[in-house]
């Protein structure tokens, strides 16, 4: 069994798209290496600049004994928020590690029944497709806790199920009969993807799923969903299933997430393109997202023609034009994927809705800017591939705080998310930046408008990456999660890594390291009511022992990190950073050789509105970045949610190697012998029941 899992590591534990699909000439591709090298000495966020700024905007200085000493006097009424745990050492075991005084429990590992239609999870992999339809899915990722009546002990935990490990899912991995995937196996895989809504309740100190709750739901890669916004109802998305182009079956490869100010969940479709196949002439917009030409990722298309197939449920993954028009083949099926999808967890009868106005790409997640009454709303979303971009959607409607408490939540979603302008970011080397509108009248290459080059807004949105190329956006080092500070509105973005950034592609000030194996976190502050922003780099990932040019934030053994990915602020202003470092090639970098993936905490101080800079992690304050959690071997740590009172925090362990242990919910327990690995949510609490982290 173990050998199968080890093999699976090589075939299915990573679905990130490593191919550079951005062939535009946007900087840095057009930049001169010499110029970028000379810039590196004055990179924003570099040590010198940061130390100079410490005078005005202080984190805290670090005493010789490692204890933080506040530089500024503590305000009398409001004690300064401070982390209250000791940074964890490196760990490389098959178990989770939390600080002293904390507990960690497994909740809703894949295959956990949500209702009585599912058989209990089977250690030998024999659960059916119907079991998976009524259980939690695989490869937990983005997540949010929606309280019921404001409770911190009962709520709806919504979890993305990003992709699958076929070897853990089936008794002995995927099979094929005469070149075809068996229909039941394919349905089981499709049902293991998507999103789960779990009604959860705390009894004593244990969180459990409320079995058979009316709120428990699964959205899979086959669940019918609405297509709303400019692309919905257009010729791009008309299929035999939805001749008027208003619906599509399924959401796929749901990675990070977002929420809205009106209490809905947003699930982000990331590496969906590889699930399809086009053996014909691949249109430009499919090429730009990487639709394969030889086979789909799991070869779901090979089950087409099975006697049990309903309405092309398998054939739709082959988008090669074969009939007379779009209603006689599945050429448009792939155009129904690549969106942010809004889900109302509180209404079990609601239909998930794809908000096409927010763009179509490998969405990592979506964080919203702090709402201001009478002003438009902003949502930020990274496109996670090498040299791709970061986007901002701005609503046409202005925020009405009364909408926060309406019960017709998806109608509120339509009001703010179906009409607006999608922008893409350009980061200038002088610390300024600009949001470039992806609108028909925006002038791009050669003085030509986007409308003249691509057509109407629906055509621009279908090929969002191509449109962003055309207006000169800045190619980034794999934009993952965004997070917005709850009071000052600074926006943070994880740039996970980019080992393809080399002498030919060049660097820019926002992505300043060649062969960026460790990633960094950039942040910006949008000028109110404008498309301008100021940015700086908050922290550079690096191994503690790396040279100063790599370890620019002076990280140490107890906070060295690489490949920052998941990231969120809690309501208090603590920023939680999660890593996905082991995935891309095992223990092949110095951080992965020292520790498993982890979650760290830090309390960032605000950027200055005028200079666009602020205190960043550097030699004088690096102890303020503390490691709070380490995951088990081979796993990525991702997804984060909080009870309203912050006494319970939830995170996800994705693709562990030999975890969790059988017959216990203790996430810190080592398995005895080999177990069938299960991605799972982990709930972390203090033994004294007080808020986590402080
Ligand atoms: Fe699914 Fe970009 O992480
Ligand atoms: Ca992942
Ligand atoms: Ca991710
Ligand atoms: Ca990642």
Image: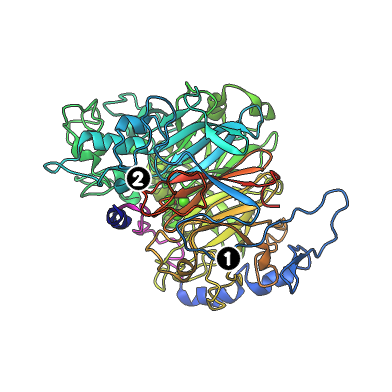
Magenta run includes residue 481: no
Q: Position of residue 9 (x, y in %)?
A: 33, 56
Q: Residue furthest left?
A: 178
Report the mark closest to the observer, 1 or 2: 1
Figure check: 118 above or below 585: above
Q: Position of residue 314 (x, y in %)?
A: 24, 34
Is label 1 in contact with label 2 (beta carbons under 8 Å)?
A: no
Q: Position of residue 693 (x, y in %)?
A: 67, 52
Figure check: 191 above or below 15: above
Q: Is residue 154 visible?
A: yes
Relative placement, left or right, of 61 versus 211 is right
Along the line of sight, the residue nearer the viewer: 305 or 149: 149
Identify the residue at horizontal 17%, vertical 32% (top origin): 323
**Which circle marks residue 483 in the picture?**
none
Magenta run includes residue 17: yes
Q: Which residue is mark 1?
A: 89
Identify the residue at horizontal 43%, vertical 51% (top origin): 659
Q: Position of residue 343 (x, y in %)?
A: 49, 31
Alpha-carbon span between mark 1 and mark 2: 31 Å
Marks counted in the figure total 2
Relative placement, left or right, of 672 versus 189 is right
Identify the residue at horizontal 57%, vertical 22% (top origin): 408
* Earlier sequence position, callout 1 versus callout 2: 1
Q: Which residue is mark 2?
A: 164
Q: Is residue 531 visible?
A: no
Figure check: 573 above or below 319: below
Residue range of the region highlighted in magenta in the rendering:
12-31
Identify the residue at horizontal 53%, vertical 74% (top origin): 550
Secondary structure type for disc 2 = loop
Relative placement, left or right, of 615 versus 21 is right
Q: Quadrant of residue 559?
A: bottom right
Secondary structure type for disc 1 = loop
């Amino acid at each position: 069994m173990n050998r199968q899992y080890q093999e699976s590591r090589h075939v299915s534990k990573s679905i990130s798209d490593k191919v550079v699909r951005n062939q535009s000439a946007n900087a840095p591709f057009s930049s001169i290496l010499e110029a970028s090298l000379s810039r590196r000495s004055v990179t924003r966020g570099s040590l010198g600049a940061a130390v100079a700024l410490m005078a005005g905007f202080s984190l805290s200085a670090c005493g010789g004994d490692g204890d933080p000493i506040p530089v500024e006097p503590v305000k009398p009424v409001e004690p300064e928020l401070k982390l209250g745990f000791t940074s964890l050492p490196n760990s490389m075991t098959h178990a989770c590690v939390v600080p002293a005084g904390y507990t960690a429990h497994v909740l809703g590992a894949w295959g956990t029944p949500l209702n009585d239609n599912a058989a209990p999870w089977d250690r030998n992999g024999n659960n059916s497709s119907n079991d998976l339809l009524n259980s939690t899915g695989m490869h937990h990722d983005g997540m949010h806790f929606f309280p019921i009546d404001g409770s911190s002990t009962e709520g709806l935990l919504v979890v993305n199920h990003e992709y699958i490990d076929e070897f853990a899912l089936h008794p002995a991995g995927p099979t094929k009969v005469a070149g075809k995937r068996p229909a039941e196996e394919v349905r089981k895989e499709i049902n293991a993807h998507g999103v789960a809504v779990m009604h959860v309740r705390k009894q004593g100190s244990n969180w459990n799923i409320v079995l058979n709750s009316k709120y428990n739901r699964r959205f899979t890669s086959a669940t019918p969903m609405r297509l709303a916004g400019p692309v919905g109802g257009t010729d791009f998305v008309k299929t035999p299933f939805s001749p008027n182009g208003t619906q599509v079956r399924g959401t796929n490869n749901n990675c990070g997430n977002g929420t809205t100010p009106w209490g809905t969940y947003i699930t982000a479709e990331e590496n969906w393109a590889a699930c399809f196949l086009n053996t014909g002439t691949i249109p430009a917009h499919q090429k730009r997202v990487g639709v394969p030409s030889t086979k789909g990722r799991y070869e779901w298309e090979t089950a087409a023609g099975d006697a049990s197939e309903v309405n092309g449920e398998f054939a739709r993954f082959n988008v090669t034009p074969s009939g007379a028009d779009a209603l006689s083949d599945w050429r448009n099926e792939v155009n129904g994927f690549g969106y942010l999808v809004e889900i109302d967890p509180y209404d079990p009868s609601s239909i998930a809705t794809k908000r096409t106005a927010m763009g179509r790409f490998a969405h990592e997640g979506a964080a919203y800017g702090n709402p201001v009454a009478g002003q438009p709303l902003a949502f930020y979303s990274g496109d996670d591939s090498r040299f791709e971009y970061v986007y901002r959607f701005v609503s046409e409607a202005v925020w009405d705080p009364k909408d926060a408490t309406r019960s017709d939540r998806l109608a509120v979603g339509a009001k703010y998310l179906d009409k607006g302008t999608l922008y893409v970011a350009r980061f200038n080397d002088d610390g300024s930046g600009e949001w470039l509108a992806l609108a028909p009248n925006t002038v791009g290459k050669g003085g030509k408008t986007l409308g003249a080059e691509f057509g109407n807004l629906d055509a621009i949105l279908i090929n969002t990456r191509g449109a962003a190329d055309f207006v000169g956006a800045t190619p980034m080092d794999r934009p993952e999660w965004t997070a917005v500070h709850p009071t000052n509105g600074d926006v943070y973005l994880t740039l996970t890594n980019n080992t393809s950034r080399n002498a030919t592609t060049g660097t820019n000030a926002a992505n300043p390291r060649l062969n960026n194996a460790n990633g960094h976190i950039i942040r910006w502050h949008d000028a109110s009511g404008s498309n301008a922003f100021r940015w700086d780099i908050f922290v550079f990932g690096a191994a503690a022992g790396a040279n100063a040019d790599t370890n620019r934030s002076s990280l140490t053994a107890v906070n060295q990190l690489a490949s920052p990915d998941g990231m969120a602020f809690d309501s208090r202003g603590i920023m939680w950073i999660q890593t996905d470092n082991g995935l891309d090639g095992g223990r092949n970098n110095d951080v992965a050789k020292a520790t498993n993936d982890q979650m760290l905490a830090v309390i960032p101080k605000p950027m200055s509105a005028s200079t666009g800079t602020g205190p960043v992690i550097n030699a004088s304050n690096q102890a303020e970045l503390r490691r709070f959690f380490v995951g088990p071997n081979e796993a990525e740590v991702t997804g984060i949610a909080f009870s309203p009172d912050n006494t319970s925090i939830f995170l996800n362990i994705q693709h562990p190697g030999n975890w969790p242990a059988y017959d216990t919910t203790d996430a810190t327990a080592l398995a005895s012998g080999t177990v069938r690995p299960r991605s799972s949510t982990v709930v972390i609490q203090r033994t004294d029941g007080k808020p986590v982290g402080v």
